Amino acid sequence: MNADDPLANAISDWQRKYRIADDDPIIAVLELVRLQLQHARINRDDAGAAPPGFEDFRGTIELLDRRSKAFIHQASDLVAELRRFGLNVHRINRARVATQFALLVAGMVIGGLLIRLL
């Protein structure tokens, strides 16, 4: 963040005050807000237009919220499937061990019977 930017300084102070880590999701949201404000300043400086209004900003944040909820839902579905996959692999591995043990015992019994018969 730029040291001359008052918003960046306020965010840094707020982050230190509440001990918020750099990788916290709220910091990403604040970065998006800062980028939107910078983009509005650039557009205002270039075209002489007014910055986006509160409704535009609110609409953008609501859109971000809807998209993030969809992403969170998809991510939770993926995590659930990965957990189920892990449990299935664990079950298959247990079945493999049991099968190998049964085959080992059967082989020993058959081998013992063959030795007695010959």
Image (cartoon, rainbow, N blue to C red):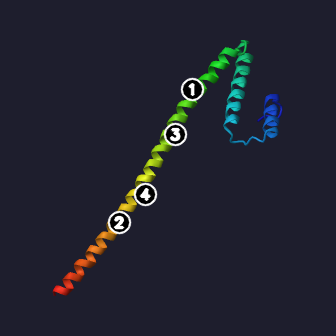
Q: Nearer the viewer, mark 2 or mark 4?
A: 2
**C-alpha span from label 3 to label 2:** 33 Å
Please indicate, yes or no, whether residue 52 appears anywhere in the rendered image: no
**Label 2: element kind:** helix
Sequence order check, earlier mark of 3 and 2: 3
**C-alpha span from label 2 to label 4:** 12 Å
Image spot of residue 96 (x, y percent):
35, 63
User: Residue 90: which numbered mark, if any?
Assistant: 4
Reading the image, the residue beneath label 3 is 76
Local crowd size for mark 4, using a 10 Å CA cut-off: few (<14), some (14–19), many (≥20): few
**C-alpha span from label 4 to label 3:** 21 Å
Sequence order check, earlier mark of 4 and 3: 3
**C-alpha span from label 4 to label 1:** 36 Å
**C-alpha span from label 1 to label 2:** 48 Å
The answer to the question of whether label 4 and label 3 lie on touching residues, with beta carbons closer than 8 A, is no
Q: Nearer the viewer, residue 98 or 24?
A: 98
Reading the image, the residue beneath label 2 is 98
User: Residue 66: which numbered mark, if any?
Assistant: 1
